[in-house]
């Protein structure tokens, strides 16, 4: 859970006025590590807010390319498709599950139509 900057300033202001960390933790219902990280942020960046999140890694398997690869060779195994995308077969399987692509199903059962 992320605390607002106003709340952080209030806690640190009380600590700077002489309130102990333990008392601040009880009153504000926060952990000592939260206070320590806020003080560390102030020392390193001069700001009380958290560091910005890192950018997410772009997916290696493009959905459109995967669907077109499956449509071109519907009988290809996961291993064969994974070689095209330079990844593990498990990655192809997980991506197919997310896209709602299931295994090939035959409508003919034991000679009946």
Image: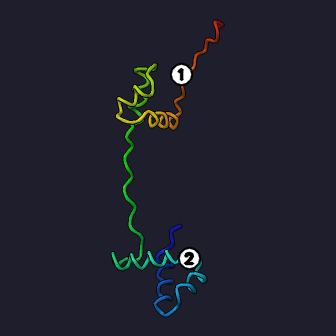
Along the polypeptide, which appears first: circle 2 or circle 1?
2
Above or below: residue 41 compared with residue 76: below
Q: Would residue 113 appear left or right of 60 to someone viewing this image?
A: right
Work out how far the residue at label 2 is from the one at label 1, CA to CA, in angstroms: 53 Å
Query: Is 107 placed above or below 63 here?
Result: above
Badge 1 crowding class, 10 Å Cα cut-off, few under 14, some 14 to 19, many 20 or more, is few
Instruction: Give the numbered dot on residue 104.
Output: 1
The answer to whether residue 10 is left or right of residue 88 is right
- Quarter of the image for residue 28 reads bottom right
Q: Nearer the viewer, residue 72 or 37?
A: 37
Q: Splitting the image into 4 quarters, where does residue 89 fall?
A: top left
From the viewer's side, name the closer residue of 91 and 42. 91
Residue corresponding to mark 2:
30
Task: Identify the element where label 2 is drawn.
Answer: loop
The residue at the point 39 percent across, 75 percent down is 41
The one of 15 and 3 positioned closer to us in this rendering: 15
Residue in the foreground of this view, choosing between 29 and 5 = 29
**Residue at point 42%, 28% (across, down):** 79
């Amino acid at each position: 859970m992320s605390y607002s900057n106003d709340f952080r300033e209030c806690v640190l202001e009380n600590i700077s006025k002489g309130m102990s960390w333990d008392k601040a933790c009880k009153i504000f219902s926060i952990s000592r590590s939260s206070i320590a990280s806020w003080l560390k942020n102030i020392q390193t960046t001069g700001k009380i807010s958290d560091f910005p999140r890192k950018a997410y890694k772009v997916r290696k398997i493009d959905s459109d390319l995967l669907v077109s690869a499956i449509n071109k060779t519907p009988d290809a195994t996961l291993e064969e498709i994974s070689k095209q995308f330079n990844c593990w077969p498990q990655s192809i399987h997980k991506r197919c599950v997310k896209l709602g692509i299931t295994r090939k199903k035959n409508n003919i059962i034991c000679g009946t139509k």
